[in-house]
Image: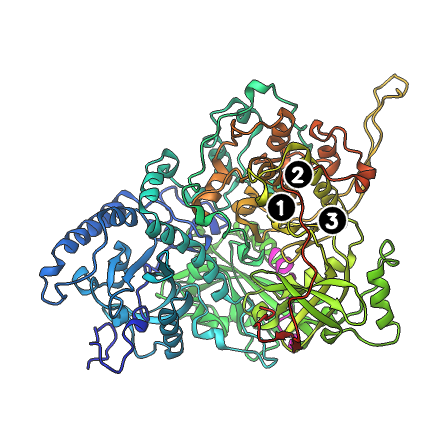
C-alpha cells in the first residue's frame, strides 16, 4: 500500500472505518510570501502598495473575521464552485468513485456555498463516513479534485509525520459522536505538509443519533508554534511566552458555529443572506487599527442615516495615539436629551434570531489576545537567561516582514536574519550592547526567508524586572528599504532620527505590555504563589458570621485548605473552571468555591488572569461585590472561597420572565446597583471588562453582586474633586452645583477580551480602551434587561463585531420603554468613547440622568427590589452530594461530580 504523502490509501479491515473519517481533512489556503503591509512601517508607502487579497484573508483569520475577495479572486472561487457543483452531478459516472455516494439537497448545497469557511460534511449513517459535501476552498487549498474527494473517506491526507495520538482522539470522537478541536500535520496532494487546525462537530437528529459530521479546517502553519509547543525551559514552563493553540482553537470554535447552523437550518441561512444587512460589503479596515489619516476617511463613510447619529456618533476607529491625545484635551459635553421624534422606534430583527441554538451558547467571555499580541509592529522578545538568547515571542508583523513561520524562529537566536552583505561591525556593536545590557539603535542589511534583503533599522532594548535584574531583550525592526539615500546606500540622518523615535516608542509599549504576563523564568510553583497568601478581613465585613467562622480556624494557626470544606452541589461551570457550593466543616456557613485547573490555565494563557482575579477580589469591600475569605492551591488546582449568592444569576432570572425582559422599575433598580459597583471598581483602578447578566449574582435579599474578574484590568486611579466654575461677578447661588468626586482608572489597555455581544467598539478596533468600555457594557445590559436581547448581535462573531461598529441603534416599538431609558442607552452606546456618557466625570454623569430620577443613591442598599412577574427563587441549599470526598482538588464520588 502506498503510504506516500498525499496518496489515497485503501481501507483495510484493520482500520477503523467510521472512526478515522476525519483524521486528515484539509486546510485553508497556505501562507504565501508577501510584502509587509505599510501599516507596520514608520514610512508612508506608495499608494499602489496594498496588502494582497490573500494576505488580507489570512491576516483576518486570527480575528474570526472574513473579507470579500477581489473580483479576480471571486471569479476563481465561482469557477471552482461551479465546477464542483457540476462534478457533483457527474461524480457517479466516475470510475474512481462508487456509484452510490451521499448527496446533499439542493437547498443545503446552496446555503453551504455561501460560506467562506473551509470545511467538509460527511454522512455519519454510512460506513466509512464518506464526504457528501466539500467547500470550494477545500479543493483549492488541498489540491484535490471533486472526484478524488466526494464519496470517499478523508484519511487520504495523512502522512508519515501525522501524530497518531491526535488521530486516536479524532477516532474516539467520531466513534462516540463527540466534538474535537486540535492541530495535526496533514499533507496536500503535492506532498506539502501543513499544520491543520481541525474542528469536528457532530450533527444529530431529534433522537440524538449522529447523522452528519462537519469538519472545518484552518491552516495555521505560519502562526502556530508547531512542534515548538513542546519545548520547555529548564524550569519546566513553556519556552514560548504565548501558547497559540488555545488562541486558535477558540477562534475556530466560534467560526464553526455558522457552519453548524447552516447545516441544521439551510433555509434560514439563505433567507438571512438575502437580507441587505448580510450582503453589505465587509471591510477589513473597519476591524483593525488605522492611521490618523485613514481614521478620518473612514469616519466620513460610517455616517448614520438617522439625524441623531449624525449629531452624536463618531467612528470608533481611532488610533491609540489619537485616543490618548483626545483624553488629555477638552472633552465635549454629553449630548442633551433629544426630542422623542428623533429617537428610533422601529426595529429590524437581528439576523441571528432565526437560529435559536445560538441564543445562549455564545455568552462565554473571550480572551483573543493580550495587549502584547495586539501591538502591530515588527518585534521579537528574547530571553538572555537561556542559552544563546533565543526568541521566546515574535509578533505577527515580524513574521510577515521576514517570511518565516513562528515554528521556524521560536527558540532560535536572531542571527538567521544575517546574510552576505550584513555588516559584521554593526553586528559586533549589537553583541557588545547585549553583553553590556544596554540599548542600541543601528541600521543594517538583513534577509528574509526567500533571500530578499531589506534595510533594517534595529533597536535593542533590555527589560529589567522589579529587582532591576535583566529579564528580556526587546528587538524592534523597521524596514527602511524604500527610504535609502541612493549615494550613501543608507538612511539619511534625519530619517534615522525620526525612525529611531518610532522604534523606541514601540519598545516601550512592548515593555509595558509584557509585564502583564508572568515571568517565564519563574518556578512553576511560584506562578501560583499569590493563591497561598493569607487573606485578611476588610473593615466592613470583619464581623459577619462567615468571617468569624473562618477566623476560628486561622487564629489557631491552621492553614485553610480543601479538606476544610464539604461539597454540597455544583453551581456552575465556565471555560476555565467551575463553582461549587461548599460548607465549612464544623459550621453551618456556606460559601462558593471557584476552582481552576493549573494545566488548563497554563495552556490557555490565563495564569496572569487567575492571579489578577485573586489580587482584585482581595481588595474588595463593598455590598455589591464579592468578599474573598481565603484562597489555596492543590497540586492541580487553585481555589477561591467567596460569598454564596443564593439568588443565582441575573441572567437566569431574566430568562424566567414571560418576555425575557424586566419591567422598567426592575431594570432601573438592577442597573443602579451595577452602576454603584462599577463606580467602586473604577475608584480602585479596576476596569471590569466583562459585564453581562451571567456575571451578576443575586443575594438572598435580591441585591446584586458583580462576580468573575479574570478578564479585568488592574491599574492605578487618581481620585479628584471637580468644582463647577463660578460665574464671574456674581455671588455664589444656593443652587450652584456641588463639587463632584471623580475616580476613573487613568491607564489604557489593548487586550481583546470581553463577551462578544458586550464588547465595545474600541476593543474591536484595537484603538486602546479605558474604563469607558464598562459604560458601553452598562448600556448593552440595560438594553437587554428592557428588550430581552442585545442590540448588535449577529449570526456569527464577525457579523456581531460589524454591527457593533456600524449598525444603527434601534429600539423595538413592540416593547414600551420610556424616552428617558432610550436616551440613556443611546448616550451610553456612543461609539466614540470620548462622547460616551460617563467618560468625562465617571458614574456621576450617569447617576444624574433622568432615567435614575428617584433613586436614593446613598440608601439604595435598603431598598426592596421591585416585584417581578416571575419572582426570584433561591437555590436549594440541601446537599445532593452524599459520602463524597475531595481528592487533590477533584470531587470524587459515584456521581462523577468533578471540579470540571
Q: CA distance from mark 2 to mark 1?
A: 9 Å
Residue displayed at 31% across by 47% down = 266
Would you identify the image quadrant in which residue 537 lies?
bottom right
Kindly identify which residue carries mark 2.
868
Give the residue pinned by disc 1: 653
Q: Is residue 485 visible?
A: yes
Residue 486 visible? The answer is: no
Horizontally, residue 267 falls left or right of residue 491, namely: left
Image coords of residue 862 (percent x, y): 82, 41
Residue drawn 52% across the image and 70% down it: 427
Q: Is residue 623 magenta?
A: no
The spot of residue 707 in percent (x, y) is 68, 54
User: Mark 3 falls on what kind of element?
Assistant: helix
User: Label 3 to label 2, Cα distance in Å?
Assistant: 28 Å
Q: Are marks 1 and 3 in contact (CB under 8 Å)?
A: no
Residue 581: name its quadrant.
Answer: bottom right
Q: Are marks 2 and 1 in contact (CB under 8 Å)?
A: yes
Labelled pair 3, 2 in contact (Cβ < 8 Å):
no
Residue 755 versus residue 485: which sits nearer the camera?
755
Magenta stretch, residue numbers? 509-524
User: For this rendering, which residue is in front, 480 or 741?
Assistant: 741
Q: Is residue 518 magenta?
A: yes
* Mark 3 lies on residue: 681
Amino acid at each position: 500500500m502506498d503510504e506516500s504523502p498525499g496518496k489515497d490509501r485503501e481501507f483495510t479491515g484493520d482500520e477503523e472505518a467510521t472512526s478515522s473519517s476525519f483524521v486528515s481533512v484539509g486546510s485553508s489556503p497556505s501562507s504565501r510570501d508577501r510584502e509587509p503591509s505599510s501599516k507596520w512601517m514608520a514610512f508612508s508607502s506608495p499608494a499602489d502598495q496594498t496588502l494582497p487579497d490573500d494576505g488580507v484573508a489570512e491576516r483576518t483569520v486570527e480575528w474570526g473575521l472574513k473579507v470579500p475577495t477581489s473580483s479576480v479572486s471571486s471569479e476563481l472561487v465561482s469557477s471552482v464552485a461551479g465546477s464542483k457543483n457540476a462534478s457533483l452531478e457527474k461524480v457517479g459516472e466516475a470510475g474512481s468513485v462508487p456509484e452510490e455516494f451521499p448527496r446533499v439537497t439542493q437547498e443545503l448545497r446552496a446555503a453551504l456555498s455561501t460560506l467562506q469557511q473551509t470545511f467538509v460534511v460527511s454522512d455519519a449513517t454510512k460506513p466509512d463516513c464518506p464526504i457528501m459535501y466539500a467547500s470550494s476552498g477545500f479543493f483549492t487549498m488541498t489540491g484535490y479534485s471533486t472526484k478524488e474527494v466526494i464519496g470517499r473517506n478523508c484519511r487520504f491526507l495523512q502522512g508519515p509525520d501525522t501524530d497518531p495520538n491526535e488521530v486516536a482522539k479524532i477516532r474516539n470522537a467520531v466513534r462516540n459522536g463527540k466534538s474535537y478541536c486540535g492541530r495535526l500535520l496533514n499533507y496536500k496532494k503535492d506532498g506539502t505538509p501543513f499544520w491543520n487546525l481541525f474542528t469536528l462537530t457532530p450533527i444529530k437528529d431529534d433522537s440524538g443519533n449522529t447523522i452528519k459530521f462537519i469538519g472545518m479546517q484552518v491552516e495555521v502553519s505560519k502562526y502556530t508554534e508547531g512542534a515548538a509547543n513542546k519545548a520547555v525551559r529548564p524550569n519546566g514552563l513553556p519556552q514560548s511566552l504565548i501558547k497559540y493553540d488555545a488562541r486558535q482553537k477558540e477562534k475556530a470554535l466560534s467560526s464553526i458555529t455558522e457552519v453548524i447552523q447552516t447545516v441544521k437550518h439551510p433555509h434560514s441561512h439563505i433567507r438571512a443572506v438575502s437580507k441587505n444587512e448580510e450582503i453589505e460589503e465587509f471591510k477589513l479596515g473597519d476591524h483593525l487599527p488605522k492611521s490618523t489619516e485613514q481614521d478620518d476617511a473612514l469616519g466620513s463613510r460610517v455616517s448614520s442615516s438617522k439625524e441623531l447619529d449624525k449629531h452624536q456618533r463618531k467612528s470608533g476607529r481611532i488610533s491609540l495615539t489619537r485616543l490618548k491625545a483626545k483624553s488629555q484635551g477638552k472633552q465635549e459635553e454629553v449630548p442633551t436629551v433629544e426630542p422623542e421624534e428623533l429617537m428610533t422606534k422601529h426595529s429590524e430583527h437581528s439576523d441571528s434570531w432565526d437560529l435559536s441554538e445560538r441564543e445562549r451558547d455564545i455568552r462565554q467571555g473571550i480572551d483573543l489576545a493580550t495587549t502584547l499580541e495586539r501591538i502591530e509592529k515588527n518585534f521579537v522578545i528574547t530571553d538572555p537567561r537561556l542559552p544563546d538568547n533565543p526568541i521566546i515571542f515574535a509578533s505577527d508583523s515580524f513574521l510577515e516582514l521576514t517570511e518565516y513561520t513562528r515554528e521556524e524562529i521560536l527558540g532560535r537566536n536572531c542571527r538567521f536574519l544575517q546574510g552576505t552583505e550584513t555588516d559584521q561591525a554593526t553586528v559586533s556593536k549589537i553583541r557588545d550592547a547585549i553583553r553590556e545590557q544596554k540599548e542600541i539603535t543601528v541600521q543594517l542589511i538583513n534577509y528574509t526567508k526567500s533571500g530578499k534583503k531589506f534595510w533594517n533599522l534595529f533597536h535593542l532594548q533590555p527589560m529589567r524586572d522589579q529587582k532591576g535584574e535583566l529579564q528580556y531583550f526587546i528587538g524592534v525592526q523597521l524596514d527602511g528599504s524604500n527610504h535609502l539615500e541612493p549615494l550613501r546606500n543608507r538612511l539619511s540622518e534625519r530619517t534615522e532620527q525620526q525612525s529611531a523615535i518610532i522604534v523606541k516608542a514601540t519598545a516601550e509599549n512592548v515593555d509595558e505590555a509584557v509585564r502583564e504576563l508572568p515571568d517565564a523564568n519563574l518556578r512553576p510553583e511560584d506562578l501560583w504563589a499569590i493563591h497561598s497568601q493569607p487573606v485578611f478581613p476588610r473593615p466592613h465585613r470583619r464581623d459577619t458570621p462567615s468571617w468569624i467562622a473562618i477566623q476560628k480556624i486561622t487564629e489557631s494557626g491552621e492553614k485553610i485548605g480543601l479538606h476544610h470544606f464539604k461539597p454540597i452541589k455544583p453551581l456552575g461551570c465556565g471555560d476555565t473552571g467551575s463553582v461549587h457550593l461548599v460548607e465549612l466543616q464544623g459550621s453551618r456557613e456556606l460559601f462558593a468555591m471557584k476552582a481552576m485547573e493549573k494545566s488548563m490555565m497554563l495552556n490557555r494563557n490565563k495564569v496572569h488572569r487567575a492571579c489578577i482575579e485573586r489580587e482584585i477580589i482581595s481588595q474588595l469591600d463593598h455590598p455589591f461585590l464579592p468578599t474573598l475569605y481565603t484562597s489555596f492551591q492543590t497540586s492541580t488546582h487553585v481555589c477561591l472561597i467567596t460569598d454564596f449568592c443564593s439568588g443565582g444569576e441575573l441572567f437566569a432570572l431574566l430568562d424566567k420572565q414571560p418576555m425575557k425582559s424586566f419591567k422598567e422599575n426592575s431594570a432601573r433598580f438592577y442597573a443602579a446597583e451595577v452602576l454603584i459597583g462599577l463606580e467602586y471598581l473604577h475608584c480602585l483602578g479596576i476596569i471590569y471588562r466583562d459585564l453581562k447578566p451571567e456575571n451578576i449574582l443575586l443575594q438572598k435579599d435580591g441585591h446584586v453582586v458583580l462576580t468573575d474578574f479574570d478578564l479585568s484590568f488592574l491599574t492605578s486611579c487618581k481620585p479628584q474633586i471637580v468644582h463647577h466654575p463660578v460665574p464671574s461677578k456674581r455671588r455664589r447661588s444656593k443652587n450652584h452645583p456641588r463639587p463632584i468626586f471623580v475616580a476613573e482608572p487613568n491607564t489604557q489597555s489593548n487586550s481583546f477580551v470581553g463577551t462578544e455581544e458586550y464588547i465595545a467598539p474600541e476593543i474591536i478596533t484595537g484603538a486602546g480602551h479605558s474604563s469607558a468600555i464598562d459604560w458601553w457594557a452598562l448600556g448593552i445590559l440595560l438594553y437587554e434587561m428592557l428588550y430581552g436581547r442585545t442590540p448588535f448581535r449577529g449570526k456569527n462573531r464577525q457579523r456581531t463585531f460589524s454591527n457593533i461598529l456600524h449598525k444603527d441603534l434601534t429600539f423595538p416599538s413592540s416593547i414600551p420603554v420610556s424616552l428617558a431609558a432610550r436616551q440613556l442607552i443611546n448616550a451610553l452606546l456612543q461609539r466614540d468613547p470620548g462622547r460616551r456618557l460617563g467618560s468625562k466625570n465617571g458614574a456621576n454623569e450617569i447617576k444624574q440622568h433622568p432615567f435614575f430620577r428617584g433613586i436614593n443613591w446613598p440608601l439604595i442598599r435598603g431598598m426592596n427590589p421591585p416585584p417581578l412577574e416571575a419572582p426570584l427563587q433561591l437555590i436549594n441549599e440541601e446537599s445532593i452530594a452524599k459520602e463524597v470526598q475531595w481528592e487533590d482538588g477533584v470531587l470524587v464520588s459515584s456521581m462523577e461530580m468533578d471540579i470540571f
